[in-house]
Image (cartoon, rainbow, N blue to C red):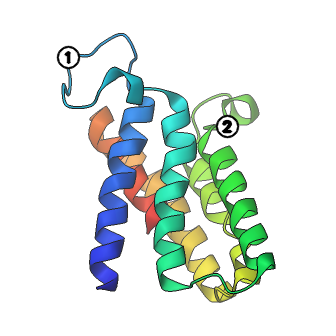
Amino acid sequence: MNWILILLSSIISAILYRAGGMDKGDITEPKWIPKWLRQSWVRDWLCPAALLFAVCFFWAPYHWLSWVMLLLFYGLSGGALSTYWDELFGYDNFWFHGFMCGLAGIPLIWFGIPWQLLVIRVVVCTIGMGLWSKIIDKDYVEEMGRGVFFIL
């Protein structure tokens, strides 16, 4: 059941990550993603929601502080997804983008997620998003892959 939930969340995140990065004016490819989903807020705020769904399924919140940590995680994740750090590096730095997406999970330690999982998440997001973006040259495959790494 756990793998099915992770797979489902990964697919949802991949689609949302791609939809949020699509050209708003070109609705030719793919036609099944409506124009209203082609907004950057879709990536920034719905991908973290897909991850929160999986997290809450595995570790049900039991205390009000847990909900505060989840909201903090949600905000940090949305902020991390909203930039590729052009202003800092002068170009889209997907390695640092992945690092910050992984690091956004720090509040989950107080939620009860072991810190070792956070370290693994940071490594997977950093290397996964950076390397994936370096070797893949199709924009839709690249963006969908980064959406999957965000969940993993």
Q: Is residue 37 left or right of residue 47?
A: left
Q: Secondary structure at mark 1?
A: loop
Q: Position of residue 117 (x, y in %)?
A: 58, 83
Residue 148 position in % (x across, y down) = 38, 58
- Name the image quarter holding residue 112: bottom right
Between residues 132 and 103, which one lies in front from this camera angle?
Answer: 103
**Label 2 secondary element:** loop
Asked if labels 2 and 1 touch by Cβ distance under 8 angstroms, the answer is no
Q: Residues within 10 Å of mark 1 (few under 14, many from 20)?
A: few
Tag in front: 1 or 2? 1
Question: Quarter-wise, where is residue 84 in the image?
Answer: top right
Query: For residue 28, which numbered disc appears in the image?
Result: 1
Q: How many marks?
A: 2
Q: Mark 1 is on which residue type?
A: Thr
Q: Residue at x 64, y 37 (%)?
A: 83
Q: Earlier in the sequence, mark 1 or mark 2?
A: 1
In this picture, is 108 found above or below 58? above
- Residue 22 coordinates in the image, percent (x, y): 38, 26
Residue 143 located left or right of residue 100: left
> Residue at horizontal 78%, vertical 68%?
68
| Vertical comparison of 122 with 81: above or below | below
Q: Amino acid at mark 2?
A: Trp
Q: Residue at x 42, y 43 (%)?
A: 17
Which residue is labeled 2 in the image? 85
Quadrant housing the C terminus = bottom left
Q: CA distance from mark 1 to mark 2?
A: 29 Å
Between residue 102 and residue 69, name the one nearer to us.
Answer: 69
Q: Is residue 32 left or right of residue 125?
A: left
Q: Position of residue 36 (x, y in %)?
A: 40, 24
Q: Is residue 30 above or below residue 55?
A: above
Residue at 47% x, 79% y: name it.
Answer: 57
